[in-house]
Structures are given as structure tokens and as C-alpha cells.
Amino acid sequence: MSYKYPYLNTDMPDKNEVLQKTPNKATKELIRKISGDGNETYLDRFASQQPQCSFGLNGTCCRMCQWGPCRITEKSPRGICGRSQDDIVISNIIRSLVSGLAAHGRHAHEIIYTIKGIAEGKINLKLKGITRIYEMAEKLELDIGNKTENQLAGEIADILVEDLGRMDNKNIRLLEVFAPEERKKLWGELGILPRSAAYEIMEALHMTTLGSCSDWKAIAGQEKRSALAYCYSTLFGSSLATEILFGIPEPNETEVNYGVLKKDHVNILVHGHSPVMIEKVLEKINLPEIQQLARDYGAKGIVIGGLCCTGTELLARYGIPSVTNILGQEFVIGTGAVDCVVVDMQCVIPGMKILADCYGTQVITTCNSNRIPGAVHLPFDPEKPETLDEDAYTIAKTAVEAFKDRDRSKIHIPDVKTKAYGGWGYESIVDALGGLDNMAELLKQGRIKGIATVVGCNTPKVAYENNHVTIVKKLLESDILVLTTGCCSHALLNAGLCNRDAVDICGGGLKGVISEYGVPPVLAVGGCVDNTRTLRLFISLAEKLKKPMKDMPFMFVGPEPGNEKTVGQGLSFLMHGVSNLVGFPAPIPVPNPIPVKGSADGEMERGSNNIADYFGGNGAMEELGAKIYTEPVPELAAQTIKMHIKRKRNNLGWK
Ligand code: NFS
């Protein structure tokens, strides 16, 4: 039985429904195994949270001061201070958005300060993204002269730091150099050009605190300003800085999924988002003495597997096999085969450590922002890097040592491995598809009908990975090319869709493109911050075709929204005129339909509220040329995306 929430106009799945619908055979085996071992996962905790609070689900609970909490009902349409439903709903959303902005900002901070540390000779790493250094130096109009690559990278890092924290009224530099002219003009007219990540977070929290702004439209304006700061300071900032640091990814072939773990090997998982420490740890793991240590303990070798965005980053750069995403992190521990998980920052759920204790798995934390009680803690701080090499060596050794004392009686590794062709970036996609002119032509001719970026987290509110995989299969059938990042990319990689063999499920046009150019139908472009790569591609294609972004057959799809960071992902694209489809209602009262008061169960009528009408109706469409669709049923969601792309093509006069 799934959980019924008629006022949301959707149901949520229970464990049985997840078992029935989740597409990965390995996941089904592990859910059953963990339950059989008598251990719990998020699925059990989700069940014990039912029913979830309707005010929380609708965004109509205000906890922004200590007079509350206030809840909006027919009897009490305003909070104690007089705040309206619209103010409360939009304030809750902007607070989620800027929490996500803070998370990506902190990620960007670590990467950018690592570049500074290397440039100043304090960190023992070598910058690998030389092409990106020169491209950025040119775009930012730096005086290149006889400067070394490290000097230039240091100057770029200083600009990225300003973009993170500028307080005076100047624009984000990365926005100035990467955003389309037409959009910059529009954002200027709307008065929403941002100063920096830090300033916009401060202003968003300021505007929504007790007795500040009570005009929901002004808060929505700050929401858009913050979304632009999110996009250009922290997504572009992190992604480009990571490319300067570790190089631009190159497509590579590998195997992914739970079956990459090996019973007779030391299995180490790397987890989080900012892979600086892990880069060093990998260097140490490859030392002959650490490899020998593993053999001394009876292991045949060492397997590294990736989780979440650190996993997708390592897959992109080194072809290191990825295993799973945020909601698979407990399942993989349940294999009983994981000796150690090395985590950096974000999306590491406490339930993972609880299960790690059940299966004797060692957890090592490497970021001061992400402490976990009971874990070994060896933090990386780019401003105090003196012990980096020593700590990385200790982590590698501790991870291998975990193998020797573990209880190995409860191991079950599902025999499921999938071929994957990952590691795509902006340049490699353009090159592989014959250049921007050719890509534009493929779109115009309709061999590629449109491009959807299908990305983001998992949520327990839809059947795990079912929306990701079902939607994408339907899009491929209709000749829509798919780009993917983050947790969604794990679902698609494991489903075998990031692999040229998936050509068979594609429509005729896309099939031809895949055969001719040798690309897979789904291009995995990295972690969530690497949506930068997709956005650059969308911007370049629109410019090449001399069309505004809002007219292009593009769509942002977030089928399983979860983390606060996901709010800014969709809005980043929305700000550029790219409509969104999300797979579960945001915490906004669902406008249509609502139950008829006092009527027999099931009777519904149309409702409306300003925030839903703005994002999902004509408001955002009139202002930005894009809107947000919500559809939790994956087959219907795919239909909506296809319809959206068809409409865009019709308006362009393309067949
Ligand atoms: Ni994105 Fe990556 Fe996953 Fe969501 Fe978390 S791992 S940054 S936030 S949950 S996709």
C-alpha cells in the first residue's frame, strides 16, 4: 500500500512499491537482504514518518521567528505577525535555495582555495587543466604576459573568491563573461543581477526574517537574484575551478554498478562532492607498499567505488567505477563487502553510518563541515595544507587495515555490472558531435529533436530510480538526446543507458546519430555543479542558431527532487528561459485540483495560489519565457517533456 496524500494530488510509495518498481535488480536484492539481516534503511524510517505533516508538505508552516510555528488554515489565514500564505511559502522556498547556494559555495571555496594554495606553492598538487586556465584568463581579460600557469590560476582564483564574497554593488564576473547577452539585458531590466553568493544569501535571509519584507513579489525577485548567484558563482565557480585543478574530463569506458565490488578485495568507497583529499588518497592507495599491505592481509587487491557526486567526478576523470547515489548509500553498505567509506562534504546521510556500524564498515570523514560521531576524522583544509600528504597516507592505510578484522560472514554482492561510457564535458560533447555548427544542424533537421538535461537527487517520495529511468527511456524513443549529472546519472549509468548498446531503444533519428558519431544516447557530464557544462552547451547552441534560449527545444528535468541544492539547479535553467519538469510537488500548495470541502471522499475542484501560479503558470513564462511543470507519474512526465519540445520546434518552424 502506498501512502495516500489526496491534497498533493499524488501518492508516495512504500517499500513494496519500491521493490516492485525500482529498475536495478541489485537494488531489489539489497533491500531484501538488509531487511533479512534485521537492519533498517531510509525506507523503514520513511514509513515510520507517515503521515508527513501537510503544512510542511505544502510550505504553509512558518518557523522564521520564535513566535511561531504558525500554520496557515482557513481559520487562521495569517501568521501571528500578519504574514500571508504567499509570503510564507516563497520565504520557505528561498531559504531552501540559499541553503543549497551555501552548500555549493562552500564546495567552491574549498576548490578555489586549493588552487590558491597550489599557486602559492603551499599544496603539493599539480594543476592539470592548463587549457582551462588560458581560456579563463582570456575571458577574464587578464594580462597573460610571461606569467606562469600557476600565477594565472592564482589570479583567476582571486576573481572566483570575489564572486563568492563581493559586498559592493558590482556584478559576478563569471556571469559577465559566460551569460548570454540577451539574458544579461533581461536580468538587468528586472533588477536581479547578483553581487556574490555570500551577499545574496545574506539578503535572502535578511528579507525573510521577522518584520522584514512582506511583499512576496520582492522576495521572488531576490529568489531569482540568488538563483543567478547560485548558477554563476557556485556552479560555474566550482566546475571550472575543478577543471583547472584536475583537468577537463575525457570520455572513457568503464563498468559501474554494485557488482564492481569484489569479495576477495579491499573495497573502498569514496563519497561526497569535493574530491581534493580523495585525489591524494588515490595517489597513496596506488603506492606499492599500500598495495602490498592489502595483499599481506589476504586481499587480492583494492577496489575503489564512487558514490554521489565525488563518484561521478572520479568516473568522469579516471573512469573509476561508480556504484550508486544518495539513496543507494545504505544499500551498498548492506552488501557487507565495504571495508571503508571515505567521505568529504554533503549528501552523506547519518543512516549510512548507522548501517556501517552494523556491517563493520569503517567511515573516515575528511571535511570539518561534515563530522560524524564515531568516524575517524582527518580533515583537509586548503588554508592549512601542511599535513595533507601525511593524512592521505593515513587514510589509505586505515582503509586497507579495515579489511583484516571485518566480519565477512554477511557478504552479498549482487552480480550486476553495467558497461558505461562516461566522462563527458562541454568540449568533448561538441567535438564528438562534429562541432557546434553540426550539432545545430542535427537539431534543426530533427535527427535530434531536442536536448533534455535529466538530473538531480533521489527522493523517498517516488519509487527509487523509477522516474529517472522510465522518463529517459521514453525520451530516447522520441529522439531526445539526454545529458545527466549527479544522483540521476547513477540511475542512468546503472541502467545501461550511458552506453552505446542502448542505441536499440532510441528512435530512428537518434539511432542514426549514435551510429554515425559513436556517442551514447545519454551523456553523463559529471557531478551536480557540472550542470555548468550543460548550460554552456545550451548557451552556445542558441547563440550558434541566433535564437533566444527560451525558444530552443531544451528542457531541465528533475524527476526525484531531494536536497535543498536541487532548488537552485532548476532555477538556474529557468532563469535562462529553459522550462523545468519536476517529479514531485515543491512545498507550494498544489493549485489543482483540491478536495471539495465537506464533500464525499475523492471530489475535487480547481484551486489557485500566487506562488504556484507564478512558477507553474503565466508569471515566470511572461517574465523569463519558461515555467515549471510538476508531474510525479513518469510516463506522463515524459509526455509533457515531449510536448514541450514539440511546441518549441513548431514555433521555430522545425519539423
Ligand atoms: Ni546534487 Fe550531489 Fe545527489 Fe542531490 Fe546530493 S549527491 S550535488 S544534491 S543528492 S544529486
Image (cartoon, helix red, strand yellow):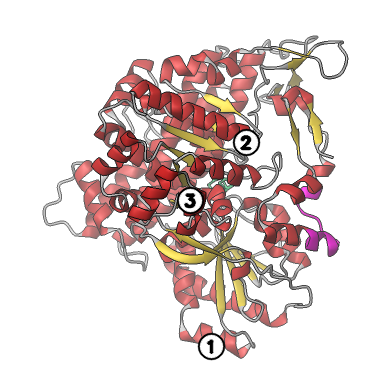
Disc 3 to disc 1, C-alpha distance: 33 Å
Is residue 31 at all visible to an observer of this figure? Answer: yes
Identity, as a three-letter code, of the amino acid under mark 3 = Gly
- Outermost residue, bottom side: 296
Identity, as a three-letter code, of the amino acid under mark 1 = Gln
Q: Nearer the viewer, residue 46 or 366?
A: 46
Disc assigned to residue 527: 3
Q: Residues within 10 Å of mark 2 (few under 14, many from 20)?
A: some
User: Which residue is identified by label 1?
Assistant: 292
Identity, as a three-letter code, of the amino acid under mark 2 = Glu
Region rendered in magenta: 32-44
Q: Position of residue 500 (x, y in %)?
A: 45, 58
Q: Position of residue 119 (x, y in %)?
A: 29, 59
- Please say whether residue 43 is one of the residues in the magenta stretch: yes
> Which quadrant of the rendered structure holds the N terminus?
top right
Q: Secondary structure at mark 2?
A: helix
User: Which residue is identified by label 2?
Assistant: 635
Disc 1 to disc 2, C-alpha distance: 51 Å
Q: Secondary structure at mark 3?
A: loop
Q: Residues within 10 Å of mark 3 (few under 14, many from 20)?
A: many
